[in-house]
Amino acid sequence: MKIRNIFLVLVGLVLLGACEKDYLDTKPTSSTATPTIFETTKNAALAINGINKLMTRQFLGSQGFNGEGTIKMYYGNYPGNHFYVNLPGWAPIINFTYMENTTSIYLYYPWYYYYMIIGNANAIIVNIEDAEGPQAEKDFIKAQALTFRAYSYFMLSQLYGERWKESNNGSSNCVVLRLDTSTGDIPLSTLAEVYKQVYDDLDEAIALYTASGKTRNNNYDPDKNVAYAIYARAALTREDYGKAVTMAQNARNGYPLMNNAAYKAGFFTPTSEWIWSSYGASDETLYFYSYQAYIAYNSSASAVRTYPKCISRELYNQIPASDIRKGLFLDPEAMAYTTTTGEAATNSPLYKKAFSLFPALYSTAKVYAYMQFKIAAEDLPGVGNLNHFRSSEMYLIEAEAKHFLSDPTGAQNALIALNQGSGRDPLYTCDKTGTALLNEIKKYRAIELWGEGFDWFDHKRWGDPIVRKAHPAGGNFQATLAVTIQPNENNKWVWKIPVKETDYNNDLK
């Protein structure tokens, strides 16, 4: 089923602009919109598809804002420790110095995007019981809306809230909890209150999914496994480790780890381990504005051809030679390249090596040492499905949680299952304990999840500094981007509340 046209239904439900008192636009556009959308469960299901589409839609009149892909790239990859792109002009984003600029569109975008999803989800949650149709369908649709809302509030909490370990057990202020279609003034809720709402939404969603007896038809639709996966990630971030283990195990049930052939196929179509993704196809493309058009190595977009995305030299050197993931990045070996930027000269040995190993590389693409070949596009300029949760992450969540639960054997076994059991590194073993084991978990999160939007979020959660090095110091970052950022700097990595909220929400003045 195509989502492009279905999205038009949702546009009639909730106005998505940003002006004056309607800055969050959580109310229906007219008195007839809500009854029309929720007249039947069939119509309400189309509204869920509309939210699916929001996750891969262009926003705010800027080509860079493309739904969930922007969160992964601008807020997860770019400012991280292991993701390099030769864009010194983007230093304010990559070095995340916009966090206190409350008028910046980059500070505002996540707020705008996630509250748009929340507003649409709230309309479904509030109105679905009045729809005509089987109760099982109502339950399933409401569960999906609750899943969207829980995910959005969790993501907002990571950006606009403090890391849990420094929040005084969640007592610090976080974001505004809007749980219905009203648009009144609402104060900030604490981080603990936001997590409680996320938990409550997911508990209710899981119960409704179960009661409905229904299953989804497409990987891009939320279902019970998606709810478990969100729960696992949220519980880990909240340092609720017992719950993180349980939810991670539940989430990966039925999603076996993909084989090596699937791993090397380009990450643009769902595999056995994709728990949740967003749909992408040639007839529903954002062209040069899609996520893949910013990262896929074979993209024809200038954002990739001119500025290929690379792994940090230091992380690359930590990947064992027996690991198939090492082959997804360009090893310069002893070949020459410009060490200040990483670029290889046209027709140089390294340039020719890249095209020889990966002939799908676009003909006019530049070649950089350590450039990535993990993520590709299915069609040009940047077509592909966008993954959000994989069972691989669930093994890593289990490993980290069990480490903090003083279960080193359980943590080791989770790492072994992910790396050796999957065949990604047939020689992998692990007998580390204590700090060495935690560092091993961190290393394999960085390797396994590279380029998927976790880097900065992980470093914030751990309270680990960003330490990027230029070539003379053993790294491969351009000098402007080779910085060290401590956890207590840059507003403790907390994005401030945008002025578009504080100007119109009197409870925040």
Image (cartoon, helix red, strand yellow):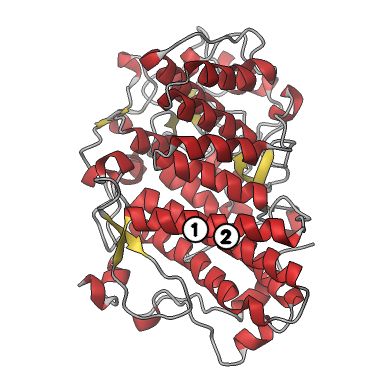
Per the rendering, the mark at residue 111 is: none
Q: Quadrant of the C terminus?
A: bottom left
Residue marked by disc 2: 204
| Label 1: element kind | helix
Give how far across and how far down residue 312 sits, in percent.
44, 24
Taking 446 as reference, is 349 above or below it?
A: above
Kind of residue at badge 2: Glu
- Marks 1 and 2, how far apart at CA: 6 Å
Give how far across and how far down residue 363 sits, in percent.
66, 34
Give how far across and how far down residue 58 sits, in percent.
55, 62
Q: Residue at x 35, y 81 (%)?
A: 184
Is 163 on the left or on the right of 245, as rendered? Answer: left
Residue marked by disc 1: 200
Q: Does the CB distance between marks 1 and 2 fall below 8 Å?
A: yes
Kind of residue at badge 1: Asp
Seen as rendered, the residue at the extreme bottom is 31
Q: Is residue 78 visible?
A: no
